[in-house]
Amino acid sequence: MATTKKETPTAQKKPAAQAAAHAPRVQAVPLFGKENYRWMLIGIVLIALGLILMAGGKSKDPNVFNRKEIYSFTRITLAPILILGGFVVEIFAIFRKDKKESQ
């Protein structure tokens, strides 16, 4: 019984580095455009401004409860509207498509 060694053509065998060099390159495409990032930044600024307004300032006397400072228009109405507006702007920025992309 003679054993024969099977030879495979060298053209079929490729080293991993050589195969990787000839593989098609995948170009990374940015997820959002410049305009989207601008809208996101505007939304973040609105949210931060709302949180700062809601926090308010330091009380003159910490032992005295000042109802007008705590329940002011700025803290109860304006700040939450700014925060919600910021979230709406963020959602808009995520779903907005670039004009170049739609053409």
Image: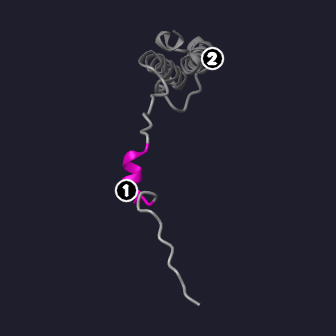
The residue type indicated by label 2 comes to Ile
Q: Nearer the viewer, residue 73 or 92?
A: 92
Q: Nearer the viewer, residue 85 or 66?
A: 85
Kindly state the secondary structure of the residue where label 2 is placed.
Answer: helix
Q: Residue at x 50, y 78 (%)?
A: 5
Q: Which residue is mark 1?
A: 17
Helix, strand or loop: magenta stretch: helix
- Mark 2 closeness class: few <14, some 14–19, many ≥20 residues within 10 Å: few
Q: Is residue 27 above or below residue 10?
A: above
Of callouts 1 and 2, the N-terminal one: 1
Place of residue 16 in the rendered image (x, y in percent of width and height, measured from the top left):
41, 58
Place of residue 85 in the rendered image (x, y in percent of width and height, measured from the top left):
58, 14
Q: Nearer the viewer, residue 98 or 93?
A: 98
Place of residue 59 in the rendered image (x, y in percent of width and height, measured from the top left):
49, 26
**Highlighted range, magenta:** 13-23
Q: Nearer the viewer, residue 46 or 33?
A: 33
Query: Which of the 4 image quarters holds residue 69?
Result: top right
Q: Whole-Å distance between the Cαs marked 1 and 2?
A: 63 Å
Q: Which residue is mark 2?
A: 76
The N terminus sits in image quarter: bottom right
The residue type indicated by label 1 comes to Ala
